[in-house]
Image (cartoon, rainbow, N blue to C red):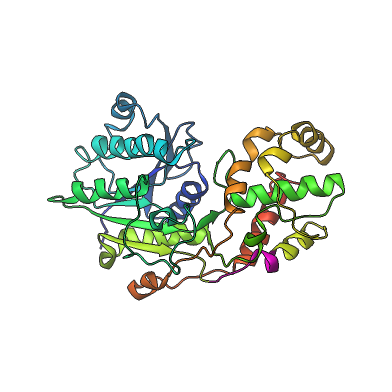
């Protein structure tokens, strides 16, 4: 018996989350995949990429108006801005432009998956209730994740499709030129430390070294996202998705240092954005000497994102039991995740 065709529209297909989601859908073998991003990508097999400016309604209409066969929208796009308030207009507009363009023409649309995060719980503002749960009360706006979900809930009324909201912790995986890639921050910081002959010092706030944290592997997140989009029990629900274990930097940091052949000396609070700003010429020399792929230093890492994560001198974790109760039981060891990503970056000749 033939199953109905499934066509995924992955919005933000070149980011840490979107890239792995595209790969997972391709691996499943029964999906056609359309990836959206500003710079497009290389088509392969059942995957094709469409370059589009999601902030330009006309460009969306031109490039997305013929996507009549889309059955599932996986929204994982993000644009950074200097302040929390400034994040709202562009990130809401991109989602609205996609839905406004695709929903009217995709008559077989079944589901819209929205990628969120712990900002829904106010985790970025300071110490918050932990473990955070999906039904925790909202916090004072502005918060674009909440506005995006409100938009979908309003749009859902009377529609035949359903939605899900996926809430990971910090997502770790492979992607270049992405502003929210902690694994790349650590890898480049460690490589430069080794090149300069200095120990690997934790650069965050003193209290952050001992705070209780969790992470989300990009592969695990991809599998959970597709599960929530295709299991009828998950219709119109939000889910925290995390690796399933907790850690403290004071335990994990020395293990990361050993991977890079470094000593983990005492933490030293410092702004990575400041101390790494002049390391471009050094990285160019390292690229030539070690035969690395010639990626521009300024596109490899977002040091402000590293500073942001390493500033969390409070617990940062959520309750992932709702996903388990609804049927998703996968987990991954966070230490193995980090070391696996670092090994992959070496194999790809991104770091020495």
Q: Residue at x 57, y 48 (%)?
A: 308
Looking at the image, residue 27 sits to the left or right of residue 312; the answer is left
Residue 318 on the magenta segment = no
Residue 132 % position (x, y): 41, 66
The correct choice, above or below, for 86 with respect to 234 in the image is above
Question: Which of the two residues, 305 or 270, is positioned nearer the viewer here?
Answer: 270
Q: Looking at the image, can residue 114 be seen?
A: yes
Q: Looking at the image, can residue 295 be seen?
A: no
Q: Residue at x 52, y 66 (%)?
A: 243
Q: Residue at x 49, y 56 (%)?
A: 126
Looking at the image, residue 254 sits to the left or right of residue 344; the answer is right
Quadrant assignment, res 274: top right
Question: Which of the two residues, 93 or 175, is positioned nearer the viewer here?
Answer: 93
* Residue range highlighted in magenta: 245-252
Viewport quadrant of the N terminus: bottom left
Residue 204 % position (x, y): 66, 53
Question: Which of the two residues, 348 or 260, is positioned nearer the viewer here?
Answer: 260
Residue 301 % position (x, y): 63, 41
């Amino acid at each position: 018996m033939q199953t109905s065709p499934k066509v995924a529209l992955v919005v933000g297909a070149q980011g840490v989350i979107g890239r792995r989601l595209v790969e997972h859908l391709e691996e499943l073998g029964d999906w056609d995949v359309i990836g959206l991003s500003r710079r497009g990508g290389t088509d392969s097999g059942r995957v094709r990429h469409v370059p589009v400016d999601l902030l330009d309604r006309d460009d969306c209409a031109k490039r997305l108006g013929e996507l009549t066969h889309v059955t599932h929208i996986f929204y994982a796009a993000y644009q950074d801005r200097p302040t929390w308030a400034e994040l709202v207009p562009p990130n809401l507009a991109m989602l609205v432009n996609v839905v406004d363009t695709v929903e009217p023409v995709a008559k077989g649309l079944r589901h819209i998956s929205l990628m969120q995060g712990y900002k829904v719980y106010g985790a970025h503002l300071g110490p918050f209730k932990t473990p955070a749960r999906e039904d925790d009360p909202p916090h004072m706006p502005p918060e674009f994740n909440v506005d995006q979900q409100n938009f979908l809930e309003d749009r859902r009324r009377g529609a035949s499709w359903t939605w899900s909201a996926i809430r990971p912790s910090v997502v770790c995986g492979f992607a270049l030129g992405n502003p929210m890639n902690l694994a790349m921050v650590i890898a480049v910081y460690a490589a430069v430390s080794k090149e300069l002959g200095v120990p690997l010092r934790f650069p965050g706030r003193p209290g952050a070294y001992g705070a209780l944290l969790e992470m989300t592997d990009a592969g695990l997140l991809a599998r959970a996202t597709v599960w929530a989009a295709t299991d009828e029990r998950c219709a119109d629900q939000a889910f925290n998705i995390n690796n399933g274990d907790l850690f403290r930097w004071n335990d994990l940091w020395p293990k990361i240092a050993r991977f890079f052949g470094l000593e983990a000396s005492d933490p030293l609070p410092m702004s990575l954005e400041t101390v790494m700003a002049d390391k471009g010429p050094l990285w160019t020399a390292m690229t030539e000497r070690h035969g690395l792929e010639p990626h521009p230093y300024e596109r490899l890492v977002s040091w402000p994102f590293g500073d942001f994560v390493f500033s969390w001198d409070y617990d940062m974790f959520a309750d992932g039991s709702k996903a388990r109760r609804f049927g998703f039981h996968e987990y991954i060891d966070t230490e193995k995740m980090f070391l696996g990503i670092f090994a992959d970056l070496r194999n790809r000749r991104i770091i020495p």
